[in-house]
């Protein structure tokens, strides 16, 4: 191999190496972006009683949500999920993780405390199922009759 060939060869290797470094960096940063959200289930928070804290989350596809039973007697059950996403339910008083694999809005509630407005929303990316949400929320609002404003709060916080 001449000196020139050697130099070209090492340039070639260096270029490949640089590409590889970029690919690895990209993989690392995209993994780091997947976020784990936590939602506490509480008997009280400030002046409010029976709440999911926070009640509204703006997440991205690939993120996960962990429901934490800080106080007992609560669980979360989906009311609306994005199209092609199965309904989900956490276990009473058990820390449960929900994976967010599809874009769209999840509306959920705590069955024992729905009447008291224990409701929440997880928006994953774009509001792909907004029509369904707008159509179905009035029935949830009717059932949350002691705190109907909490259902309005979810609707107001949808990122359109
Ligand atoms: Cu509850």
Image (cartoon, rainbow, N blue to C red):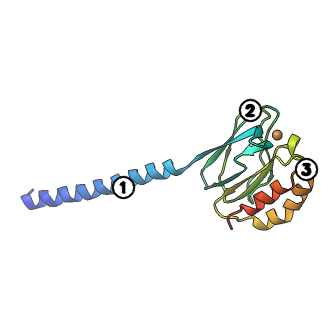
Name the residue furthest front. Answer: 47
Q: Nearer the viewer, residue 32 or 83?
A: 32
Q: Position of residue 89 (x, y in %)?
A: 78, 43
- Mark 1 or 2: the one toward you: 2
Q: Secondary structure at mark 2?
A: loop
The numbered disc on residue 67 is: none
Q: Earlier in the sequence, mark 3 or mark 1?
A: 1
Q: Secondary structure at mark 1?
A: helix
- Above or below: residue 135 compared with residue 79: below
Q: What residue does disc 2 label? A: 94
Q: Is 16 placed left or right of 36 in the picture?
A: left
Could you tell me how far apart the alpha carbons at marks 3 and 1 are, in whole angstroms? 55 Å
Q: What residue does disc 3 label? A: 146
Disc 2, ligand 1: is the CB inside 8 Å?
no
Q: Quadrant of the C terminus?
A: bottom right
Q: Identify the residue at image location x=66%, y=51%.
A: 100
Q: Position of residue 104 (x, y in %)?
A: 70, 60
Disc 3, ligand 1: is the CB inside 8 Å?
no
């Amino acid at each position: 191999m001449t000196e020139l060939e050697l130099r070209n060869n090492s340039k070639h290797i260096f270029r490949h190496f640089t590409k590889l470094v970029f690919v690895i960096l990209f993989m690392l940063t995209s993994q780091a972006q997947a976020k784990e959200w936590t939602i506490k289930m509480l008997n009280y928070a400030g002046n409010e009683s029976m709440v999911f804290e926070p009640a509204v989350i703006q997440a991205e596809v690939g993120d996960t949500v962990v429901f934490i039973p800080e106080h007992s007697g609560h669980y979360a059950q989906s009311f609306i999920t994005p199209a092609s996403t199965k309904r989900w339910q956490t276990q009473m008083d058990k820390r449960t993780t929900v994976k967010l694999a599809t874009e769209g809005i999840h509306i959920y509630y705590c069955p024992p405390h729905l009447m008291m407005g224990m409701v929440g929303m997880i928006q994953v990316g774009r509001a792909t199922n907004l029509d369904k949400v707008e159509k179905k929320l009035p029935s949830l609002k009717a059932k949350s009759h002691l705190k109907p404003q909490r259902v309005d709060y979810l609707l107001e916080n949808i990122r359109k």
